[in-house]
Amino acid sequence: MVKKEKETATKLKKELEEAKAELALRSKKKKLSVKTKPKNKEAKKKIEAKKKEAKKKIEAKKKEAKKKIEAKKKEAKKKIEAKKKAAKKKIEAKKKEAKKKADAKKKEEEAKKKEEEAKKKEEEAKKKEEEAKRTYEEELEEQLTEEEITGFQIDKTDMDKLVNRVCEMIAGYETKGILQNILWRKLKLSSRDGSRLALKLERMGMITREKILENGRWTYLLLIKKIPISTKSIENAPCLVCPVEGKCSTDGEISPKTCQYIEDWVLAELKTKKT
Ligand code: SF4
């Protein structure tokens, strides 16, 4: 039993020592921890400060970079805007130029059109003037054939007699001539027949026609070209009833040069004219 008590005491002692040692250790640790804590805080502060500094620097760099990017963006935008403006200006200038050209072309075309219209009007006026100048006879000459002109006849009229009469009347006016409308009135011929007759006489080479403006109207002055032989003058000629007319010739034995009938007839005619 004593032994047991001794063992327990030893055990307790040991345990006590161990507890003391642990306590001392804890105390030491505590002391150590109290000493290191401030150091850690400072380091931490430093680290935090460094971190802050670094963060600040990064932020500043970021800001700088951002600023640069923004500036570049602005610059690029400006350049684009300037380019756009320049392009727009060019387009506007081109548009203006094109419009100018189109306007000039339009004006030119209008002037041309006006000129053409004026020319057309002038031509029309000329045509009208020419038409106004055109006579019924000119129209007839266009419409009728030469045969129709030279073969013109008036119903129930001896055309040879009429031709001679008309020519004798025109010849009476010698070189002065006579206006065709006056002549037709004297002959009581319609202007339609008179105009055709004048054309016929001209084609026959008996008269000439001179186009003249009389009281604002175009008409013709008729002038004699060839005086027709009057049948009246040979009405009593002996040759018409001569029994030897078949044997008579200018170089023959029986000839007008030596014919007594002719001589008598000429003398009688002269006598008649004198009286
Ligand atoms: S010229 Fe004398 S002959 Fe001769 S035809 Fe006349 S009338 Fe007769």
Image (cartoon, helix red, strand yellow):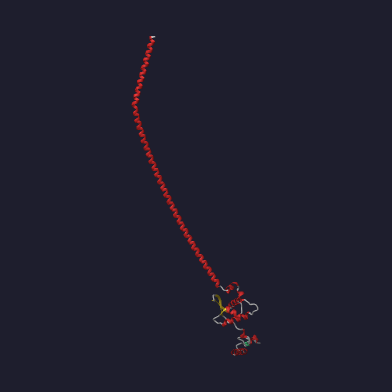
Q: Nearer the viewer, residue 163 or 204?
A: 163
Q: In the image, residue 15 lies at what x, y percent?
A: 37, 16
Q: Nearer the viewer, residue 20 or 57?
A: 20
Residue ranking furthest to the top = 1
Q: In the image, residue 219 lies at what x, y percent?
A: 56, 76
Q: Does 94 sit left or right of 37 as displayed?
A: right
Q: In the image, residue 1 lies at what x, y percent?
A: 39, 9
Q: Quadrant of residue 190?
A: bottom right
Q: Does 108 sit left or right of 146 as displayed?
A: left
Q: Does 126 sit left or right of 236 as displayed?
A: left
Q: How many marks?
A: 0
Q: In the image, residue 102 lies at what x, y percent?
A: 47, 58
**Quarter of the rendering occupied by the C terminus:** bottom right
Q: Nearer the viewer, residue 236 or 130?
A: 130
**189 is higher (above) or lower (below) than 91:** below
**262 is higher (above) or lower (below) than 136:** below
Q: Quadrant of residue 141?
A: bottom right
Q: Quadrant of residue 272?
A: bottom right
